[in-house]
Image: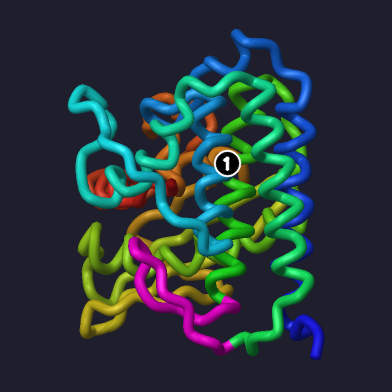
């Protein structure tokens, strides 16, 4: 029995993105490893450490036994504290140590994925994200690695792969989060609609409709009377939806029509993607 065909697109997308990261950092000099990214408190080295750590945990490696410093301002809750351990334990690693560990981790994880025998609906448990199917977990890994690839590209001034296979998965993951952000976190009015009009290499027009019970759903049909319409480009949408940038910083790339208070709550309600 080989990898289930429905899992292969996520595996291929993950492979393309993580190999792109390896190529991006393979020739970095010391100062570039310390360059700040849009992830609060994280440098290029820290983002790569997070990627390595995520794959090591997917491999089943034991988590490092490590006590975090108390002065990390960006560590604000249990989720960020959990994520920070894999990062902080590598903070003093050299560039060659980082690239060697990344390359070795990619080899090990790729081998594991090639030999994956479980069905797509097999249950997977994650300490932060809870229980999910194997298919959902592999999509989440492809999404996470692509988001961090983009973090690195922006920090290093090397744009690319905004329309890669993993970008398509990222679109679906982010769209899947919109109903909760709009209907629950931002408390959009019942029987209302919020439109996202996104242009660029990954373009889409989606409406989040809130029903009379306060539940949201996404569909592709336009709305004649949305309470809010957001118009922006794909990269800006990703940065906003992943908690990478404040709306004021990208005001020149973001058009908002409708209820300003609701718009602010929606934009402030996107969860940070670790």
Please tell me which residue is depicted at 49% across the width and 37% down the height of the picture: 254
Q: Position of residue 93 (x, y in %)?
A: 54, 23
Indicate whether residue 236 is drawn in magenta. Answer: no
Q: Badge 1, how many Cα within 10 Å: few under 14, some, many 20+? A: many
Depth check: give the residue in front, 123 or 221: 123
Q: Nearer the viewer, residue 213 or 60?
A: 60
181 on left or right of 200: left
Q: Is residue 170 visible?
A: no
Q: Is residue 171 left or right of residue 174?
A: right
In front of the other: 236 or 136: 136
**Image x and y of residue 84, in percent:** 36, 39
Q: Position of residue 171 (x, y in %)?
A: 60, 60
Q: Is residue 147 above or below residue 30?
A: below
Residue under pointer 1: 148
Q: Quadrant of residue 12?
A: bottom right
Residue 23 is left or right of residue 84, and the answer is: right
Disc 1, SS? helix
Q: Which residue is painted at 29% across and 51% down in the image?
A: 79
Depth check, front residue: 133 or 147: 133
Residue 30 image point, x, y percent: 62, 10
- The reply to whether the magenta stretch includes residue 132 is yes
Q: Split into 4 quadrants, where in the image is the N terminus?
A: bottom right
| Colour scheme shown | rainbow
Q: Is residue 197 above or below residue 19?
A: below
Q: Residue at left 32%, top 48%? A: 82
Residue 9 shows up from this direction = yes
Q: Residue at x 58, y 62 (%)?
A: 59
Magenta region: 121-135
């Amino acid at each position: 029995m080989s990898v289930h065909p429905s899992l292969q697109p996520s595996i291929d997308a993950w492979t393309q993105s993580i190999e792109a990261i390896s190529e991006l950092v393979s020739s970095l000099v010391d100062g570039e490893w310390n360059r700040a990214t849009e992830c609060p408190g994280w440098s290029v080295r820290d983002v790569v450490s997070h990627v390595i750590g995520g794959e090591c945990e997917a491999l089943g490696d034991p988590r490092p036994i490590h006590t975090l410093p108390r002065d990390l301002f960006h560590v604000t809750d249990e989720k960020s504290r959990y994520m920070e351990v894999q990062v902080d334990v590598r903070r003093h690693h050299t560039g060659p140590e980082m690239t060697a560990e990344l390359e070795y981790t990619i080899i090990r994880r790729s081998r594991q994925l090639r030999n994956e025998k479980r069905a797509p609906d097999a249950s997977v448990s994650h300490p932060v994200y809870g229980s999910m199917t194997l298919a959902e977990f592999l999509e989440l890994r492809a999404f996470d690695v692509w988001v961090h690839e983009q973090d690195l590209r922006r920090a290093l001034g090397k744009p690319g792969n905004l329309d890669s296979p993993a970008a398509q998965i990222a679109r679906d993951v982010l769209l899947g989060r919109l109903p909760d952000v709009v209907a629950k976190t931002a408390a959009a009015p019942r029987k209302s609609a919020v439109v996202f009009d996104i242009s660029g290499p990954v373009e889409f027009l989606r409406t989040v409709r809130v029903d009379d019970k306060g539940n949201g759903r996404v569909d592709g049909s336009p709305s004649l009377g949305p309470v809010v319409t957001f118009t922006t480009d794909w990269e800006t949408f990703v940065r906003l939806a992943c908690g990478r940038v404040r709306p004021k910083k990208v005001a020149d790339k973001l058009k908002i029509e409708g209820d300003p208070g609701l718009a602010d709550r929606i934009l402030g309600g996107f969860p940070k993607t670790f």
